[in-house]
Image (cartoon, rainbow, N blue to C red):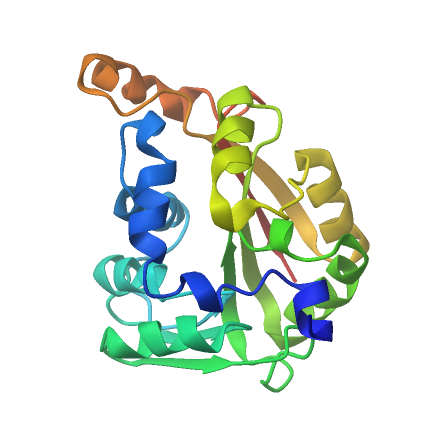
Amino acid sequence: MSEQQRQFDNFDEFAEEYRDIHDNAIKLSGADSDFFSEYKIVELTKTEDTKAAFNLLDFGCGDGNSCIYFRKHFPNITINGIDVSEESIHQAQEKGIANATFQAFDGLKIPYADNTFDMVFTSMVFHHIEHDLHGGILNEIRRVLKPGGRFYIFEHNPNNPLTRKVVRECVFDEDAVLLKPNYCKSIINQAGFKDTNTNFTIFFPRHRLLKWATGLEPMLTWLPIGAQYYIKASK
């Protein structure tokens, strides 16, 4: 096993079939992989100007699925995606997303200059990274953000038993260590970010009989039992 694989979960072996594997793993939720890619971007539209032209970094972009929805909901932005998995980057490049660039990197040093990005987004990535690397990576994210730039991190919520079940049974989450919301907020603050705000999401399965209940979720973002959560912070 390489040094990189000991530090990060590398998804090369899952890249081509990632969406099918993910769909099977989350059947209990009543939604598919595309839903979980898009809903996060929709969350961002609640606080971000969808017509603005800005520079985005998708940290740990995988196969680029989130970037499809960034292009849909934020049509004027420039998209940059990086990931340790070269095979996943190849899958992202094959999608042909307009005004988007994808590249592999070593997982530690973000290959961009200081103050490059208006926003850094990362989704379900940090639980695949060794904890002792979190602080250094957050410092790197802060370095490449412009002053006042926004950082969004989405993670699974270990306080939710169904989330733990899905992660436990998913083949590419075999080595994942889920991050408690308080831990995640703490390391973000320690890295020098400010205005950190935690929101909990996905409280009800997306099955037809429970569709009515999903309308209650915007009122429950404070309740720490949602299946996922995200933290917004700024530089």
Q: Quadrant of the N terminus?
A: bottom right
Q: Quadrant of the C terminus?
A: bottom right
Which image quadrant for residue 14? bottom left
Q: Residue at x 67, y 43 (%)?
A: 177
Left or right of 217, for residue 113? right
Q: What is the x, y in percent for residue 72? A: 22, 60
In the image, 199 versus 6, the foreground residue is 6
Q: Is residue 75 visible?
A: yes
Q: How many marks?
A: 0
Left or right of 39, for residue 10? right
Left or right of 115, for residue 67? left
User: In the orientation shown, which residue stands out farthest toward the left?
Assistant: 208
Q: Residue at x 38, y 26 (%)?
A: 218
In the image, 197 versus 187, the foreground residue is 187
Q: What is the x, y in percent for residue 204? A: 36, 20
The answer to whether residue 92 is above or below residue 26 is below
User: In the orientation shown, which residue stands out farthest toward the front?
Assistant: 1
Q: What is the x, y in percent for residue 140? A: 69, 72
In the image, 44 versus 91, the foreground residue is 91
Q: What is the x, y in percent for residue 59? A: 52, 66
The answer to whether residue 91 is above or below residue 163 is below
The answer to whether residue 167 is above or below residue 65 is above
Which image quadrant for residue 24? top left
Q: Is residue 192 visible?
A: no
Q: Residue at x 33, y 22 (%)?
A: 205
Q: Residue at x 31, y 31 (%)?
A: 27
